Image (spheres, rainbow, N blue to C red):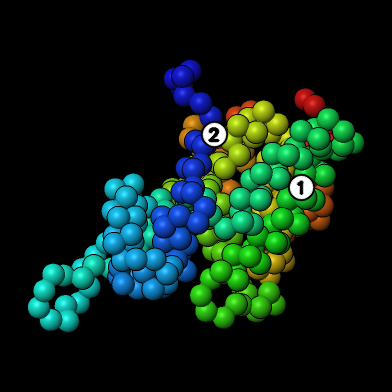
Amino acid sequence: MNNTERLGPAPAPDPPPAGGPRALILDALRGASTPQSVRDLAATIDVHANTVRTALAELTEAAQVSREPLPSTGRGRPTYGYSITQTGRNTAPARPAFREYRGLTGAFAAHLARGAEDPGAAARDIGRSWGRSLAADAAAETSGPPTGPQEDPAGSARSRVVRLLGELGFSPTRDAGGLALRTCPLLDLAEEMPDVICQVHQGLLDGAMDHYGDSTSRSDLRPFAEVGACRLSFHPEEAPSGAARSCSGKPQNSDGEARPDSNSSPS
């Protein structure tokens, strides 16, 4: 491997300014099930159509939205519908809960690293609570009736967790090896304190899976697993998941096996 290639994901894209038209449009398109016209978006976010057109041009240039012609209703210029792209979904949302997540994680990480008896376990517990909260917040923002936890099958729960990761800025991408997380919203901190930040993210996954009703699976986050990505997989639950697994910036096994528990004796 080229020594200049670094293991792990890239930084997550910065979100557009909170409350600005681009952020409002991305939020509106995240919850839309069909392409939205300029008129639709102007009504949804309550801004002038010309402002929407300008913002859509910028978002299209950044590959965060795509456009397609809508069925013609008569003469005149064609009407276009706009949809959010995967790049747009991977741009961190402007909603307060997601911004607070990024800010608060950085604030407490250094404290845990210095003072907690078991920083990884404490970070995972906090992440689990945030995962439940963020999953509930995302569900409330999604159009259509929410699915109750007891009614949500494992496959649906996993899909919703992957979507949540996209909205948080992890850029989940399916490939031949499974699920790669191409960006990280807290990469600087994760590189500095992997045993805290990566455990927050593992706990976040646990909490989101709990909220979405999947008690039969466990998530396995493998930080800095390869050049350009962390790795995420889901497995049937075989043992209690309360003990925190060690997260570090060291390379993972090429076969993708889970790392040993943090309590294991060093080899």
User: Image quarter for residue 256?
Assistant: top right
- According to the picture, the residue beneath numbered tag 2 turns out to be 8
Residue at the far top in the pictured view: 3
Q: Residue furthest front?
A: 48
Relative to 146, say whether 52 is above or below.
Answer: above
Q: Residues within 10 Å of mark 2 (few under 14, many from 20)?
A: many
Q: In terms of depth relative to the viewer, which is nearer, 49 or 147?
A: 49
Q: In this rendered view, identify the residue nearer to me: 37 or 156.
A: 37
Residue type at the position of mark 1: Arg
Tell me residue 188's x, y (percent). 60, 32
Question: Residue 133, position in %: x, y?
Answer: 70, 61
The quadrant of the image that shows the C terminus is top right
Q: CA distance from mark 2 to mark 1?
A: 20 Å
From this viewpoint, is residue 168 visible? yes
Q: Residue at x 80, y 27 (%)?
A: 266
User: Which comes sooner in the sequence, label 2 or label 1?
Assistant: 2
Q: Is residue 5 above or below residue 153?
A: above
Residue corresponding to mark 1: 124
* Residue 163 appears left or right of 48: right
CB of mark 2 within 8 Å of CB of mark 1? no
Image quarter of residue 109: top right
- Residue 85 screen position, x and y as percent: 37, 56
Residue under the image location 64 percent in, 57 percent down = 97
Instruction: Report the residue at 12% width, 81% height from top.
Output: 74
Q: Is residue 172 visible?
A: no
Q: Name which quarter of the figure residue 41 lies in.
A: bottom left
* Nearer to me, 94 or 204: 94
Q: Is residue 262 left or right of residue 27?
A: right
Residue at x 53% of width, y 29% of height: 7
Q: Amino acid at mark 2?
A: Gly
Label 2 SS:
loop
- For disc 1, the neighbor class at 10 Å (few under 14, some 14 to 19, many from 20) is many
